[in-house]
Amino acid sequence: MTRSSFAEELESAADRIEDMSRADLQINIRRAALILGNTAGVPLEPAVEEALNSIAAEMGIGRADLIQIVLREWLETNAYLPVRTIDEDSETDGCA
């Protein structure tokens, strides 16, 4: 089960909490605790953290999305990933 599907399941459970059995609630809460306990963040220097948060806010995207963009572009630039090709006729909505 992916994190996003589990998050959706938790949101659904919260919407219908009165219909769930105690055992189902315990299972979901324990699963959430395991996922949160096994989530290791990457420790960043305060200046890097501040820069990421500032850029993410400026771009109107989440910090995690920004980190994915930066990491992918670095990997492509340094030939660790193949460079994605963009179809010349495709729409970019101003974001090339």
Image (cartoon, rainbow, N blue to C red):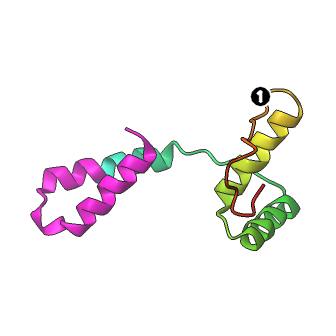
The residue at 13%/59% (across/down) is 20
- Give the percent coordinates (x, y) of residue 29: 31, 54
In which image quadrant can residue 74 be found?
top right
- Residue type highlighted by circle 1: Leu
Residue with the mark numbered 1: 81
The residue at 55%/45% (across/down) is 39
Q: Is residue 8 above or below residue 2?
A: below
The residue at 80%/42% (across/down) is 73
**Residue 47 is a magenta residue:** no
Question: Toward the viewer: 62 or 36?
Answer: 62
- Give the percent coordinates (x, y) of residue 58: 77, 73
Q: Is residue 23 left or right of residue 43?
A: left
Magenta highlight range: 1-28
Rendered-image quadrant of the N terminus: top left
Q: Is residue 27 above or below residue 60?
A: above
Q: Is residue 10 left or right of residue 91?
A: left
**Residue 11 is a magenta residue:** yes
